[in-house]
Amino acid sequence: MNRIPINLTVNGRTTELSVEPNATLADSLREQAGTHSVHLGCEHGVCGACNVYLNGAVVRSCLTLTATCDGMEITTLEGLSDATAAALKDAMHRCHGLQCGFCTPGMIITGHDMLTRKLCNSETEIRQQLCGNICRCTGYQAIVTAIASAQEEISP
Amino acid sequence: MKLPYFEHRAPDSLEEAIATLAALGSDVKLLAGGQSLLPAMRYRLSQPSVLLDLSRIEDLRLKDDALRSGRIDAMSTHAQFAHQNDPTPLGRLMAAHAQQIAFPAVRTRGTVGGSVVHADPAGDWPLLFLALGAQVELSGQRGTRRMALSSFISGPMQTDIALDEILTAVLLDVSALGLTHWGRAKLMHRAGEYAVSSAVAVRRAGGEWSCWIGAIEAGPAPMTQCAELLRSHSSLKHKDMLACAYEDVRAVCPESGQAAVHRHAVNLTRAIAQALETQ
Amino acid sequence: MQQNATSPVHASTADHHGQMIGQRVARREDARHLAGAAAFIADLNAPGCLEIAFVRSPVAHGILKGVDIAPDVPIDMVRHAEHFAHLPPIRANLLRDGYNGAPYPLLATGKVRFVGEPIALVMAPTRAQAEQWAEQIVPRIEALPAVIDARDEWEHPTIPLHEDLSSNLIMRTQRSVGEFDHIVQEAGMSGLQHVTRDFKMARVLASPLEGRGVMALRDKATGAIHLHLSTQRPHLIRSFVAEQIPALRESDLRVIVPDVGGGFGTKSNLYPEEVLLTALAMELDHPVRWIEDRYEHFVASNHARQHDQRITAYFDGDGRIHAVDATFIVDGGAYCAKTSTGAIEANMAANIMLGPYDIQHYRYEAISLYTNKSPMGPYRGVGRPGGCFAMERIIDEVAHELGMDPVETRRRNLIPSSAMPYVTATGLHYDSGDYLEAVNAAEQRVLERWNRDAPPGRRAGIGYAMLVEQAGHGSVEWFRRGSPTVYGHEAARATLNGDGTLEIDVGTLAHGQGHATSYAQIASELTTLPLDAIRIRQGDTAATPYGMGTVASRSLVMGGGAVAQACRMIVDKARRIAAANLSDTADALRLENGVLHGAQGQLTLAEIALITSVQIHKLPKDIEPGMSVQAFYRPSVETGTFSYAVHAARVEVDEDTGFVDITDYLVVEDCGTVVNPLIVDGQIMGGVAQGIGQALYEAMRYNADGQPETVTFGDYALPSAMEVPRIDIIHLHTPSPFSVFGVKGMGEGGSVPPPAAIANAVRDALLAEDIAVNCTPITPDYLLDQILARTEGQ
């Protein structure tokens, strides 16, 4: 298979990768960029464990071909360091929003996105925004509470 | 389930895409958002040897005046419609509809064109655009043509698209539409799933109604008696609307059990009720 | 008092808990995960590692005639059954009469018996390449009719799946307890009524978000095989794997468990892939890895909970249940997995069904069958969700027959707290519990906050279900069940370092339950060292004492017990050393913040540790050097602790669509002393969410040919944040009389009552039309069909 040269900026660092056409962003991030926080839970776009920021919008990295991402910016959990992220992580910790931790990176990306875009004005809205992230451990309540709590802290 | 091997081509222009498509024949699949295609490939339901990636073609991206011109370019994403604030009835309808497609992260990449060509009987955009009497624009080696969406979709997962053609836009006759009322209802058992029942009801400036349901085996179908009932009556009792809905639904899914027919009919009346409440 | 590892040292009967027990401590585990620095099995790196894809049977039942390997596939990268012919099949045993085990081959041999059964494996530099080659390895199978319906197979047996067996019966047990036969015979005369229901519960699977995974390699430094494994039972699996590979000794096998992304029981049994990769690693000079993808998880990881039940309750006009008759038919899948076997659910459901009710006359029949589906394994609660559904639904039916409030009917049948300790009809020894208090607390909260008002077109209903959960049981109970692997203890090794840090190595395996925090709280309580000075380690068989892993809600009772014991031993030794150095008596010293204070001075625990290692001149001659102790916990009462709960659900049913919304959910539970309420609440809520999945959404479906139809998260719907409501929790605290700090096991409990509570709520909502709610999942069409049939002609 012919490999394709792709420039990716991952968490602020630009690297040139050489990827196969069938490489997904999830696999490239895990195997070549070393960002193991990107998790594979289903690889068909339902569970959300692979959610990452691609040019500022959240995507399913398991359903994104790396070959379509040339020149783009990716942020994974490892690179999420703004005040919103700090507030959310702190809230997740205080509220016990993680148990096994496998869904957590995807949850934080999604949570960060909804906090940034101000889509968490009610518990119902938070749950709606969260419906694309599966958790099998927590029953979601602690995660919802964490996001609401972070929201309070960011814009009281 | 990793993706099978394929060759990736990413033309920069529509012309280049068409030429490539024509040259490579039937073993090519067009890659729009990939949100349906890639899962299908993972499960080996589809194994093309070439993916023709449309993401670099500027012409296919959503233009700013789409809701005024009525030209919905094929590579516009669900998210673009979900996030827009256009205050017209069409803008509100498309936002509400897009916001209920799958999940937020899927909406970022999923495309209108991809959804229309995929023609899943429970698909969201085909249902809406059929209710809006849309046309599709297709470009191929022999040039560009337009046809009614209702003719283009010929059955579940089946369209009239030729091997060398690319769907380039969905076209709405915005002024002729002149939407005054709109309503829609999508029943999902579990959030983000494909619809169990879905319905769209719109009223146009001339008083014509268009009512359609989706998520039935054959694909979206018009509810003509309901549309006529609404057109000809200024007020209706719920039970009469429901009875009419029942007739229309039964006519398009004769094989379905009573529960399904009831559900589709009630869901349709809910879409209609929402339309009647439009300010 | 004689000093030995198992007797409590300086423990009072009611261990004083002051600072740490009961604290909502945020978890020590979190930081790594929140930084994106966790390491699950797929994240581990081993140079030169080859990825493995399995060739799995596409057919549910058939004769395997061979495999055709396309010429493009490098033959040296392929392995099939012949390569592993020297390895015996897995044999799961149950030491009880009437159990019909059958060999479980590592790779299909001669026959295939379920879609997904591994037939061959391929190695490649990448998983994508391995899959590509695997697709070019085509098994030649002559298909046979598939056995798909357990009840059908029981009533009309067809061909045995296993040549050595004469039927597809895994096991059948039946027993009549008390005066059951007499009561039923005299029922007409004595004015007893009865109500019978047939309940069907669909097959489900635990579906942790991380699938299984195995990485095996030969460690160059030691020559040992390192088996990195996403498992819940590292030491047991190590023993089992070594047992399956004649050339491999336990001493040359090390199991190392990385972060585990959920288990819920599904990662507890021994699986063929684990043995195969270990054998491969012995043969090759490079590591091999297999990461289970979601499709594989659906077809190759253990399934659970498929019950077909017939339940009859005999009752009087006051709602008192005199006798219960229960038949459980459970679909065990194609093989008996080790250690649970396909009989585990039916046997357990029959054993625990009576729950909190004072019913001593009981007849049960527990039937488990082989079918051409993925083998069954334990899933959070195991047979309890089925048993609870049976009892809690039938007691509601009794109430409805009498026009009585189901809560009142329950009250009239509860075991009163004055009857504790109470031995059930099936021999369970309930240690303590005030069930009436829990029911009243639940009802009171419901009456205060819930009503049955609903918008037009929707019908509201409220339903209850109760649970009694046995956990932390010891050898007597495991032996009674016939398990050849007789559990009964747990182990912990505590080492106090010269810098005052405390390391505790445990034999349990947290996979989300927060042991690194709870155990540290126990250790902090007993040693007075701060939490951040305490490090809990698990999962590496070379670094932890032999333990039984984390299953059966056992860890806090058993593991916590061992941790406590080890800490007491450390403190006791420290006191003796300090006493000698401070010219004081051990008991007179005051331990506070890691410092032992005497009348004439003080010593920190760190200093004491140094005395035992590099300040030996200060160490009395009659005290051993070193500050590392190994402790074992064996419960003094082996019949287990019994936590209990009352669940209540409020639902609204859309009469026109059959959709069920759970608007409110309440849990009143008593798990004794709670070490960390944050963690306990998390376990309850997570369990309830899984129960909701079983109640309304999840079903692993097969067609008549044994083809699995639900192999994506699109078809098999796990509840999202929109399907799981807020869960209100009320805690009662009746400490166990004999566990450390009075804790009781509770990790599974949350998942047990929801199907019953929700079904009872739906039944309540639609009672006026007498809509049956006799199955899970309670699908919209199931309800809508009945609603429409009732309202026909109106």
Image: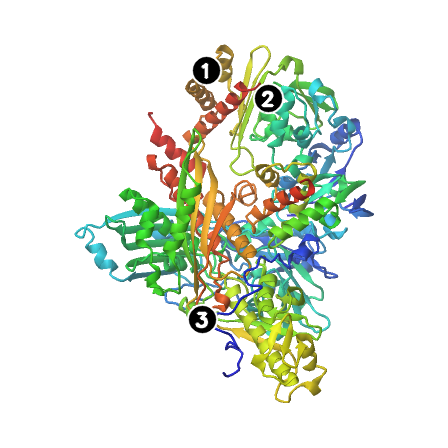
Q: Nearer the viewer, residue C779 or C360?
A: C360
- Residue C72 seen anywhere in this rendered image of the structure: no
Cα separation between marks 1 and 2: 25 Å
Q: Residues within 10 Å of mark 3 (few under 14, many from 20)?
A: many
The picture quadrant where one finds residue C176 is: bottom left
Which of A19/C269 is in front?
C269
Write the residue at 33% across / 35% down.
C768
Location of mark 3 (residue): C475
Amino acid type shown at disc 1: Leu
Provide residue C290's location: percent of width, then percent of height.
64, 57
Left or right side of A140 for C777: left
Looking at the picture, the colour scheme in use is: rainbow
The answer for which chain carries disc 1 is B
Residue A79 visible in the snapshot: yes
Residue position for label 2: B130
Q: Residue furthest left?
A: C189
Determine whether the residue tagged by mark 3 lies in a helix, strand or loop.
helix
**Residue at left offset 51%, top offset 59%:** C110
Q: Look at 67% across and 40% down and name the residue there.
A: A156
Sequence order check, earlier mark of 1 and 2: 2
Q: Is residue C476 left or right of residue A46?
A: left
Q: Secondary structure at mark 2?
A: helix
Neighbor class of circle 2 (other Cα within 10 Å; few <14, some 14-19, many 20+) is many
Q: Which residue in the protein does label 1 denote?
A: B236
Q: Is residue C620 above or below residue A94?
A: below
